[in-house]
């Protein structure tokens, strides 16, 4: 079996669902169920014996070694993290705790387990660390997209904590020989995305008749990848990636934020027109910029494409249409995640 951490979150949840849709290899899913973790995402697996869910912290040095000893996974895929940049600006402490200390403790638990494995299992074991393009910092308009060789230059508490975790993973390979893989991916979007992030926030605010908050001038560029393409890339790296190597993952889909928001408005105008026939774009509202806001991210994923043969299945146009349609069709999931603590966050970030 494989151990997935953070498998009740956005990408981890999609990964677990896709894994079990294409393979019978069981998944041990360890998730702390923070505000971002949601078991409803995994409701289809409730009676599926291939999915074992454990609520717990990656940094728990009693629980994690016990789980490893009992379930003997052939691989660990580490999605668990605090992931929202704005929250990291309001309160960095949890980011340091989970993304740095938690990853350190997880690496130590895994190292203890891995070093006691019989040789054939030790050789084939993998620890795959899921990271972000934000560790590379911000690009100027004419800069080349990030390559794996770019130095880390993180700018937010979130990206600094992820960069630190990447360094720990790298060091555990070089010093202890732990067979690790690291993926650095661009912005994901798709089903089960928590609506604190731009794309789901805009969809839900539009439908609720609320302002669509665009930070600063809205010309910041992100490189968007449909979440299921990210999950496919991780499966590809897990099976064929070279131990100790890092792989950039991206969709070759650079878009300014304002264009993304206008695209969502156009799709909603078509699929769920407003009662007054006005465009949802009339709800766009420019608000104060994010402190330290990175201007541009772009990923060069050619190592993954050339060496492992991965390429995304979705274009931005096809993926964003599927995503909007998914939010229109999934009221129950949405009302579950937009309960009390979500409303507190929205009030603090946008109304305070
Ligand atoms: P998310 O916030 O939606 O989910 C994170 C999950 O981790 C949640 O289920 C949460 O309960 C769990 N978790 C948090 N702290 C934990 C802990 N200490 N122990 C166990 N579980 C814990 O995040 P996401 O968007 O799904 O991102 C997953 C990973 O992918 C993160 O490592 C993130 O840095 C990385 N990433 C995200 C994106 C993106 O666009 N969302 C892009 C590139 C990389
Ligand atoms: O690049 C990968 C990263 O993408 C991941 O590592 C992070 O976990 C993930 O959250 C995401 O980070 P971003 O900060 O790019 O995503 P977010 O959806 O928060 O914001 C996308 C862009 O939209 C960013 O430039 C900020 C802007 N934005 C965001 C929100 C929430 C707005 O203009 N208004 C908003 O209300």
Image: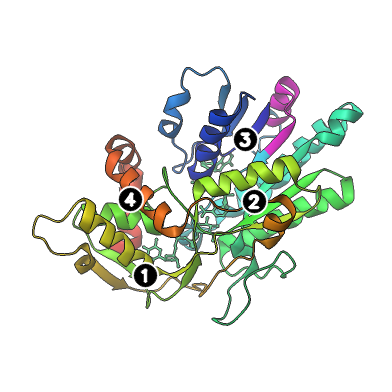
Which label's residue is closer to the chain start, 4 or 1?
A: 1
Which region of the structure is painted magenta?
64-76
CB contact under 8 Å: marks 2 and 3: no
Label annotation for residue 259:
1
Please tell me which residue is depicted at 91% across the width and 29% down the height of the picture.
Answer: 119
The verdict on residue 40 being magenta is no
Disc 3 marks which residue? Answer: 4
Relative depth, front residue between 64 and 228: 228
Which quadrant is the N terminus positioned in? top right
Which label's residue is closer to the chain start, 4 or 2?
A: 2
The nearer-to-camera label among 2 and 3 is: 2
Q: Is residue 126 above or below residue 208?
A: above
At label 4, counting other C-alpha atoms closer than 10 Å, the crowd grade (few under 14, some 14-19, many 20 or more) is many
Q: Is residue 142 left or right of residue 72?
A: left
Label annotation for residue 231:
none
Relative depth, front residue between 233 and 172: 233
The nearer-to-camera label among 4 and 2 is: 2
Q: Is residue 352 visible?
A: no
Disc 4 marks which residue? Answer: 324
Please tell me which residue is depicted at 41% across the width and 53% down the height of the picture.
Answer: 318
At label 1, counting other C-alpha atoms closer than 10 Å, the crowd grade (few under 14, some 14-19, many 20 or more) is few
Relative depth, front residue between 21 and 222: 21
Please tell me which residue is depicted at 31% across the width and 46% down the height of the picture.
Answer: 325
Total numbered circles = 4
Which label's residue is closer to the chain start, 4 or 3?
A: 3
Q: How is the image coloured?
A: rainbow
Residue 92: x %, y % from top left:
54, 58
Q: Is residue 338 above or below residue 170?
A: above
Residue 152: x %, y % from top left:
69, 67
């Amino acid at each position: 079996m494989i151990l997935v951490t953070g498998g009740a979150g956005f990408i981890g949840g999609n990964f677990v669902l896709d894994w079990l849709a294409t393979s019978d290899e069981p998944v041990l899913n360890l998730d702390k169920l923070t505000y971002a973790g949601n078991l409803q995402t995994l409701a289809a697996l409730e009676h599926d014996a291939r999915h074992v869910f454990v609520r717990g912290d990656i940094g728990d040095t009693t629980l994690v070694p016990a789980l490893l000893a009992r379930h003997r996974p052939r691989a660990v895929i580490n999605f668990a993290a605090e992931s929202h940049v704005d929250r990291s600006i309001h309160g960095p402490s949890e980011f340091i705790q989970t993304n740095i200390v938690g990853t350190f403790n997880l690496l130590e638990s895994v190292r203890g387990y891995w070093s006691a494995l019989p040789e054939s299992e030790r050789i084939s074991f993998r620890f795959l660390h899921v990271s972000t393009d934000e560790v590379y910092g911000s690009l100027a308009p004419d800069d080349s997209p990030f390559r794996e060789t770019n130095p880390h230059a993180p700018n937010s508490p979130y990206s600094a904590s992820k960069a630190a975790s990447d360094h720990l993973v790298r060091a555990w390979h070089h010093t202890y020989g732990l067979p690790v893989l690291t993926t650095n991916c661009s912005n994901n979007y798709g089903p089960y995305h928590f609506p604190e992030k731009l794309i789901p926030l805009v969809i839900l605010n539009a439908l609720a008749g609320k302002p669509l908050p665009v930070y600063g001038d809205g010309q910041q560029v992100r490189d968007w990848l449909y979440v299921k393409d990210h999950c496919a890339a991780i499966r590809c790296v897990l099976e064929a990636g070279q131990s100790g190597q890092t792989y950039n993952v991206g969709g070759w889909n650079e878009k300014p934020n304002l264009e993304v928001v206008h695209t969502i408005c156009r799709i909603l105008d078509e699929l769920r027109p407003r009662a007054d026939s006005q465009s949802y774009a009339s709800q766009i509202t420019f608000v104060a910029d994010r402190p330290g806001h990175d201007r541009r991210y772009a990923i060069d994923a050619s190592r993954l494409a050339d060496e492992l043969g991965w390429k995304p299945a979705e274009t931005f146009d096809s993926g964003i249409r599927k995503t909007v349609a998914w939010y229109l069709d999934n009221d129950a999931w949405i009302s579950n995640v937009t309960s009390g603590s979500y409303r507190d966050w929205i009030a603090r970030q946008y109304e305070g």
